[in-house]
Image: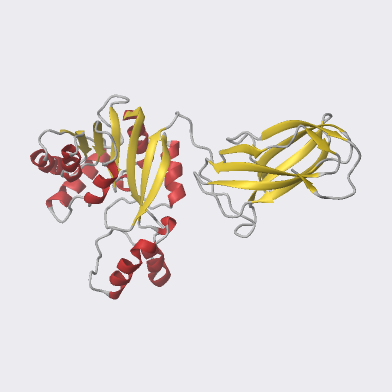
Amino acid sequence: MDEDQENARQYYNRLYRGWYRDFETEAWVDLIDRWKPGKLLEVACGKGGFLKQAAALGFDVSGIDISDVALEAAALNIPQADLRLSAAEDLPFDERSFDYVVCLGSLEHFLDPAAAAAEMSRVLKNEGRALVVVPNSHHVEAMYDNLRYGVSSHDGQAVELLATRWQWVRLLGDAGLRVVETKGSNKRPPLRPFKARSLILRVLRPFIPLNISYLFLFECERGNGERSEPWSYELRLKKPLPPVLKAGADYNVKLRVRNRGYAVWMTPKTNIYPVNVGWHVDSRDGTRASEGRAELKKPLAYGDAAVVSCRLRAPEVPGSYSVTFDLVREGDFWLGGRGGEPARMDVEVRGRPRTDRRCSD
């Protein structure tokens, strides 16, 4: 361990000798109950409470912690576990050693959370799963405290990184852990169990939206080694254009778009730089014949998808054309080439321009 890690070891040894206890584990064990038993590593395992319950479910468990005081208690709690004294930024295991890696409310306290997440990705098997639980910087209590007192709630530990949902998704993605499912949790021991504030929060707990939950529970898969891109997307034509269009006629086209990046696609009602579905029709010599837009009905964050209807008018002049459907951040750039591929198709426009504007299906 380097000097900073040694200081962290001594700090957590003092905590474990004093007031500090293991993070609540019962709720998280329920999350792995659906996993097929295999080799499981807990990063920052503390006194082994979670590992003991995971072993009871049939998992072959291992754990690391920076506190030898915690590991001594864990060894008594679960003697069959492979327990090692280590910093999370330098895990003492070979690549692709584990079917599952979990880190429960600790990533935010590491000296280098990004390096620790990269290590978790390194020791995870290609088809493995990781469960990462982290706090939300903008949970409902923190916003209340900030509004009233000008400070956000903090759990009192020496190091704590607070971030929003999408900042965490970006950190994990860049480290090689692709988030495949996100849940929120508001299970938190009240600091003042009989105060009106705590009672109100208990009543509101089931109704708190994901993005202002106290905790985020990220289930991740091992990425492909590439850094996540802010504007990655998928675009697929559900109802494409016919190969031959009537000059001047209107056509309905349906597309399915999915956000695969950590940037949130805002709408014109929520941002001055919204993301819209856009298209342009170009002649074979590259001349732009027309273009158009269709707005998203609501903001789309990572993993969110929507079906968008586009009303496209065929050029007035017969000939050969290329039609491109893409996403565009208005006033800034088209998203094609920034982590996604536009949909393109060639069409022939024939006949004279229509005098009526009825839509052709």
Give 236 or 126, whichever is nearer the viewer: 236
- Counting from the top left corner in percent of width and height, residue 51 is at 19, 40
- Kindly identify the residue that appears in the image at 32 percent across and 25 percent down: 96
- Kindly identify the residue that appears in the image at 41 percent across and 52 percent down: 163
Location of residue 167 with respect to 90 vertically, above or below: below
- Counting from the top left corner in percent of width and height, residue 309 is at 67, 47
Give 156 or 184, whichever is nearer the viewer: 184
| Quarter of the figure with residue 18 | bottom left
- Kindly identify the residue that appears in the image at 55 percent across and 42 percent down: 258
| Quarter of the figure with residue 180 | top left
**Left or right relative to 229: residue 115:** left
- Counting from the top left corner in percent of width and height, residue 230 is at 54, 42
Q: Quadrant of the C terminus?
A: top right
How many numbered discs, if any?
A: 0
Location of residue 64 with respect to 195 vertically, above or below: above
**Left or right relative to 233: residue 200:** left
